[in-house]
Structures are given as structure tokens and as C-alpha cells.
Image (tube, helix red, strand yellow):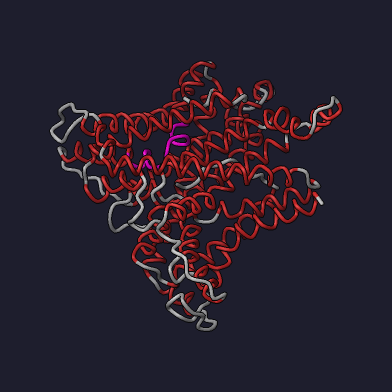
């Protein structure tokens, strides 16, 4: 009896979570511009989506941003983890608290604060004849900023777990410091680096709020594009895009799970 | 040599942290306390008492508290059931429940718009059953539903994680010592999974309190949350001082909620990570 109830409950939540997604997928094949009726099966929204230069441009921006911001945030996160590990406990706690602000703070506040600093910095630069253009560069800086705490969160525990004697032993055995790092320390923290990179990559893909405030007109990622399109009124191409993105995420997760059984890390919602 | 190394490692992210985290926050405080002529003022903060703004703030607090409570009540039993499954099945089924979290969140809210609209899926189903159409979209209830739907996985995951770490021998010991089901749950299981509950509540409450996308998509322009008001100040009105002032008020609520949550958190590791 108890088992039946829990089974029904699991199925109930499952349906609640997936029914809306199923509806999106169904509408992506609906041959009728209005959602009121089913006009037969079609692939035309997919074709139109691929021909829409704006959507494709936003997709390209999103992917380049995710790749670049995740790479830079991982490098900065690795450097931060290595140096935090050597700090005194007190200093480390203070540094970590500051570093974690973008993770704990509301995205709207982080987005606004970044927008204000870019404007202030731009005003400062105009005295010297330069300007800051809101667009790819500002969004990239924003994404790196909110990604760093997540890469540190993934890498720092790995770094802390390393026994310093192994590094010293490598030096004693004649390895140069860089050899000792590459051959002894790095392999131990590599899993943390990879999971940090992946987390940063997906967070960047999904971000809307921070991008919204620092992007400026004329530059769009998929999230901001979806936002404007949905507010304008719905284009069926958005359903096609949803379906493909859902399948993409599904595929990525299957690959990652197969790859090394990575666990889902705690992360925060995109807004 | 070692000192120099350390400076090279610390330098870049320290500069980054100061330039893009610390100074921007100081700027919000500066704008929040000044007017457009850079003179000190409290007007931006007192804008929160403006009837429309105050209503939006109260509605935000109400809806985000409601959504957090419903998420907790829905996620906890689910996490219990999932964590009690055979380990192979448990991991796979839990992943199924987490997958929507990885899908673009705007699209998930967009999906509910499709369901709740005047001519949406639910009203068409009602019409098919010869029932009268319901006014679903552009209501506070629709926004609460969107919050619950969007953030449920963020409540489920930390609670599930802390339940899988739970030592069930302790639970059995409680039963052996004569505790009944309810006592065991509230006195043993809940306190031991408190870190998961706390992190779940924070991960739902803060984004729900500050969202403007969910209310944009499911509230039309008829239902405004505090996030919408702040967003409008920055992207439409262009009054950064007012927007910053309201953000400061909002941050007070975030900090208070975090402090309250921190009080319940028994996990000492996490305690150091919050300001």
C-alpha cells in the first residue's frame, strides 16, 4: 500500500515536470501558426529556425561565450584554488566569502552592479578618448565573474586533498617544479578542473539575468533572444528551438554520465 | 621564489574580485544613497514605501515564501522515496528529475505560458470536456506555479544528497528505542538532513524573491514583482539611483533570510562560506 502511494507520487511529480516540456515538443511539429488548433505534422519551424539569422547568431554567441567564459573562469579558479590553499585559514575564509558573493547574491543585483561598473569605467575612459561598447566583451566579463566561484568550489577541495609530500618527493627525485606540478599535482586535481569547467559551461549557457543587464542593444544570446521573442508574441520557431535545446542537454548529460559518472553538483537557478 | 609564485597566482583573481565584485557592489551603495547630482539622499530607499512598489515587494515575499514551502513539501517525500530505492535505480531516476534543471529556464516558463493562456492547452482541455474556460494566466497563482515548477529540482537535489548521506542505522536505532514514525522523522531524519533543507530553501527563496522573468511571462504586465520594478528602473526608466536604492532594500531581505537560514544550518563547512 505504502509502496503504491509512493510510486503514484513519483509518477505524479514526473508528469508535472515533463508535461510542459512534452507540450513544447508537440507544438514544434504543429503545422499551424496559432496554437489554438492542431494543423498537422510539419518540420517547417525547424527549417525556418535554421534559416533565421538572428537565432543562429544568438546560438553562435551563446556557444562562444560559454566556451570562452568557462575556460577563463576555470584558469582563474585553478589559480585561486592553488593560492587559497596556501593561505592562512583566516585569510582564506575572508577571500572565499568575497569570492562567493556572486553565487549567493541575487543575479539581478550582480547584473545591475556589473552594469554600473561598466558604465562608470566607460565614463572614466571617455576622458582618454576610449569607449566601452556594451556587447560581447561586457557579457564575457560578467559570465567569467559569476562562473569563478563555481570553478573554485569544484577545484579547491581537490587541491586541499593533495598531500604536499608527493610534490616535495617529486622535487627530491629530481623533477623540476613545473614537471612536479604537471606530472604529480595536476592529475590529482584534473577531475575537479573538468567538473568545474562543465558546471561553468552550463551556467553560462543558461544565464539570462546577468546577460540581460550587461549586453547592450544589438547583442543577443539565446536566453535574451528567447526573452524578447516571447514578450513580442510567440514565434513557433521558439518551440523548435526548445526541442533541440532539450535534446542537446539530454545528449550532453548522457555523454557526461557515461564518461565518468559525474554527479550533479549543487547549482543555483538562472534567475 | 615561493613568495613571487604566490603573488603571481593570487594577483589575477584578486584584481578580478576587487574590480568586478567588490567595487560594483560599492557602486550600488553609492548610487542608492545619492541623487543624480551626486548629493546624499535617502529618497531612493524611501521609494519602497510607494504604494505600487510596496505592493510588489509584499507580493514577492508572499509568493516566494509560498513557492519555497510548496517546493519543500513536494521535494522532501520525493527525495525520501528516491533515496530509499536500490542504488542503481535511485541514481538514474533522480537524474530524470534533475534534467529539467539543465534545460533553459526561460523555455520552461514559456511552456507554462502555453499551458495557461486564454486559448492555452488547459483551457482547450476544459472546453473539450464542456467545462467553462478559466482565467489562469496573468494571476499571482500562475506566477507561484511557475516558481514552483522552475525551482523544484533545486530543492530536490540538496535534500536528496543529504538523505543519501544519512546513516539509516541511526534511524533504526530510534525505532528500536521506541520512537514512532512521526517522532523518528521530526527528531532524527529532519535534523540530520538540515544542511540539505537549508541549502534547498536558499536556492529556491532567493531567486524566487528576485525574479522578474517568471512574472513577465506568466503575469503579463498586470502582476508586478519587486524584480520587475527594479528591472524597469534600469532598462526602461533609466533611473539608476532609484533602481540601486530598491536593490539595496531587496538585499536586506536576502541577507536577513540567509542569516535566518544560517542559524538552522548545522553544517560547519558551509557556515564559513556565507558572509
In the drawing, does residue B96 fall left or right of residue B59?
right
Residue interval drawn in magenta: A100-112
Count of numbered badges drawn on the protein? 0
Q: Position of residue A15 (x, y in %)?
A: 64, 60
Residue A82 in sight in this render: yes
Residue B1 in sight in this render: no
In the drawing, does residue B238 fall left or right of residue A82?
left
Task: Locate residue A52: give its quadrant.
Answer: bottom left
Q: Nearer the viewer, residue B36 or B193?
A: B193
Q: Nearer the viewer, residue B57 or A178?
A: B57
Q: Position of residue B243 (x, y in %)?
A: 27, 40
Task: Locate residue B99: give its quadrant.
Answer: bottom right
Task: Locate residue A174: give its quadrant.
Answer: top right
Q: Position of residue A69 (x, y in %)?
A: 45, 46
> Is B236 one of the magenta-colored residues?
no
Is B14 rendered above or below residue B83? above
Q: Position of residue B204 (x, y in %)?
A: 52, 42
Which residue occupies the extreme left position in the image?
A: B37
In the drawing, does residue A86 fall left or right of residue B52?
right
Is B43 rendered above or below residue B133? above
Residue drawn at (15%, 36%), measured in percent from left and top?
B36
Amino acid at each position: 500500500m505504502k509502496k503504491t502511494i509512493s510510486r503514484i507520487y513519483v509518477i505524479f511529480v514526473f508528469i508535472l515536470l515533463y508535461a510542459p516540456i512534452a507540450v513544447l515538443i508537440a507544438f514544434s511539429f504543429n503545422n499551424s501558426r496559432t496554437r489554438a488548433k492542431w494543423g498537422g505534422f510539419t518540420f517547417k519551424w525547424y527549417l525556418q529556425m535554421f534559416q533565421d539569422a538572428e537565432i543562429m547568431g544568438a546560438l553562435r554567441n551563446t556557444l562562444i561565450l560559454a566556451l570562452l567564459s568557462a575556460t577563463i573562469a576555470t584558469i582563474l579558479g585553478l589559480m585561486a584554488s592553488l593560492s587559497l590553499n596556501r593561505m592562512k585559514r583566516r585569510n582564506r575564509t575572508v577571500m572565499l566569502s568575497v569570492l562567493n558573493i556572486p553565487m549567493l547574491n541575487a543575479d539581478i543585483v550582480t547584473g545591475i552592479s556589473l552594469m554600473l561598473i561598466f558604465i562608470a569605467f566607460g565614463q572614466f575612459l571617455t576622458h582618454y578618448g576610449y569607449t566601452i561598447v556594451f556587447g560581447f566583451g561586457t557579457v564575457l566579463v560578467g559570465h567569467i565573474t559569476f562562473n569563478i566561484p563555481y570553478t573554485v568550489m569544484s577545484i579547491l577541495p581537490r587541491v586541499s586533498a593533495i598531500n604536499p609530500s608527493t610534490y616535495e618527493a617529486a622535487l627530491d627525485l629530481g623533477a623540476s617544479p613545473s614537471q612536479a606540478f604537471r606530472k604529480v599535482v595536476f592529475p590529482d586535481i584534473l577531475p575537479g578542473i573538468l567538473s568545474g569547467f562543465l558546471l561553468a559551461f552550463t551556467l553560462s549557457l543558461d544565464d539570462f539575468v546577468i546577460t540581460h543587464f550587461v549586453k547592450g542593444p544589438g547583442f543577443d544570446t539565446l536566453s535574451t533572444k528567447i526573452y524578447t521573442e516571447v514578450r513580442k508574441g510567440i514565434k513557433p520557431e521558439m518551440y523548435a528551438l526548445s526541442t533541440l535545446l532539450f535534446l542537446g542537454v539530454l545528449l550532453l548529460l548522457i555523454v557526461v554520465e557515461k564518461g565518468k559518472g559525474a554527479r550533479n553538483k549543487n547549482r543555483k537557478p538562472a534567475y | 621564489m615561493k613568495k613571487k609564485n604566490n603573488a603571481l597566482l593570487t594577483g589575477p583573481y584578486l584584481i578580478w574580485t576587487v574590480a568586478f565584485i567588490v567595487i560594483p557592489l560599492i557602486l550600488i551603495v553609492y548610487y542608492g544613497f545619492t541623487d543624480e547630482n551626486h548629493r546624499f539622499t535617502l529618497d531612493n530607499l524611501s521609494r519602497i514605501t510607494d504604494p505600487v512598489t510596496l505592493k510588489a515587494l509584499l507580493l514577492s515575499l508572499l509568493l516566494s515564501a509560498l513557492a519555497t514551502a510548496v517546493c519543500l513539501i513536494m521535494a522532501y517525500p520525493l527525495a525520501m522515496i528516491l533515496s530509499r530505492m536500490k542504488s542503481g535505480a535511485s541514481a538514474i531516476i533522480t537524474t530524470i528529475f534533475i534534467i529539467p534543471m539543465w534545460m533553459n529556464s526561460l523555455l520552461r516558463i514559456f511552456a507554462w505560458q502555453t499551458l495557461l493562456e486564454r486559448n492555452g492547452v488547459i483551457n482547450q482541455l476544459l472546453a473539450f470536456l464542456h467545462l467553462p474556460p478559466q482565467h489562469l494566466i496573468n494571476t499571482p497563482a500562475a506566477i507561484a506555479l511557475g516558481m514552483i515548477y522552475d525551482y523544484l529540482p533545486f530543492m530536490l537535489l540538496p535534500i536528496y544528497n543529504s538523505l543519501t548521506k544519512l546513516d539509516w542505522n541511526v534511524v533504526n536505532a530510534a525505532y528500536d528505542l521506541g520512537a514512532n514514525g512521526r517522532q523518528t522523522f521530526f527528531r532524527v531524519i529532519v535534523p540530520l538532513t538540515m544542511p540539505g533543507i537549508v541549502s534547498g530553501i536558499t536556492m529556491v527563496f532567493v531567486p524566487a524573491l528576485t525574479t522578474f522573468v517568471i512574472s513577465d511571462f506568466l503575469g503579463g504586465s498586470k502582476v508586478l514583482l519587486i524584480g520587475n520594478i527594479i528591472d524597469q528602473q534600469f532598462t526602461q526608466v533609466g533611473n539608476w539611483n532609484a533602481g540601486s536604492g530598491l536593490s539595496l532594500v531587496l538585499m536586506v531581505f536576502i541577507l536577513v533570510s540567509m542569516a535566518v537560514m544560517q542559524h538552522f544550518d548545522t553544517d560547519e563547512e558551509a557556515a564559513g562560506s556565507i558572509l
